Image: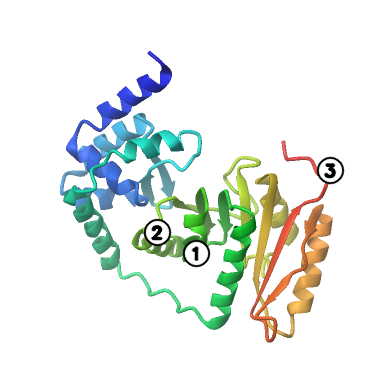
Amino acid sequence: MHDSTEKLIVHLKALADPVRLRLLALCVRGEATVSELTRVMGQSQPRISQHLKQLCSADLLERFRDGHFVYYRVPLDSQHAAERRRLFALFPVEETQFETDFERLCKLRAEQGLPIPEQEDDAVRRLHGALIELTVSTPLGDLLDIGSGQGKILKLLGSRAQRAVGVDIDADARQIARAELLLAGIENCSLRNGDMYDLPFANGEFDTVVLDDVLGEAKRPMAAIGEASRLLKPGGRLVFLGRTNSGNAGKLGDQLTVWCRTANLRLAPPRKIPSKDPHWMLAVATPAAGKEAAA
């Protein structure tokens, strides 16, 4: 048999159990811990863990550790994404148990007493509008948000990306972001613990990398920019976001120009948002001509 046929058989065998089918249907919608999945399913943790192990063995789920917790989710890699989409399309939309499980997971997240995210002011809305404009002419592709915080940029851009990953050193912020993305129904996002000076990703893995308001207080801004550049695919772009005001907007723009020139990046003119009394600066950089991709 063809390899794809063998793979389909493996997938169908893994899903030939109602609990495993429910687990996969839930993890399609977002990442969840073993404890959360155990409570949603109402079964023992050893039994749920065994089901999850079989789904991982069939490459339908992946597991990763974030602090003290182990999370499960559908893999976001693009290599077999089309195969998974065809498989998930077979899930019956009239199955109410899937929605019941999702509602239980949302309730569990609500019971954790997560803080209410800050309300967006006019400057933030303008910033988000400018970010959306960036996606019109050039697709985001695989997106990395460095300094993702509570997931605002992921919520805004995640559905426009092929896949989206947020990294942040704040475990509480990652937990809030997961809850927000789950409620927003954005299924192609994942959160990871990450140090912007040493990120756990391969060279050239992302089309778009956002440095999300992290350079202003960075001790080694050039190292952070270099690490972000390492992760860019050929033709990719870096997006810089930074809080500012009318007093320091020019200084921040000058610093960014120097950093990008040193990093062999071509920087488009930074944009102040709003143009009068700016609260944010948005800038886009691309590798300069002749720059070799990281090996």
Answer whether residue 220 is visible to the viewer in this image: no
From the top left corner, tell me how far across and down residue 124 is, in percent: 55, 76
Between the C-alphas of marks 2 and 1, the distance is 14 Å
Between the C-alphas of marks 1 and 3, the distance is 33 Å
The secondary element bearing badge 2 is classed as helix
- Earlier sequence position, callout 1 versus callout 3: 1
Residue under pointer 2? 178
Label of residue 182 in the image: none
Q: Residue lying furthest top in this view?
A: 1
Label of residue 290 in the image: 3
Q: What residue type is disc 1 on? A: Leu
Q: Residue at x 44, y 50 (%)?
A: 188
- Earlier sequence position, callout 2 versus callout 1: 1
75, 125: nearer the viewer:
125
| Callouts 1 and 3 close, C-beta under 8 Å | no
From the top left corner, tell me how far across and down residue 1 is, in percent: 37, 13
Label of residue 156 in the image: 1
Position of 209 with respect to 180 (left or right) is right
Quarter of the image containing the C terminus? top right
Answer few, some or many: residues within 10 Å of disc 3's Cα (few below 14, many 20 plus, some between 14 and 19). Answer: few
Answer whether residue 81 is visible to the viewer in this image: yes
Position of 69 with respect to 40 (left or right) is right
From the top left corner, tell me how far across and down residue 209 is, in percent: 62, 54
Q: Residue at x 54, y 76 (%)?
A: 125
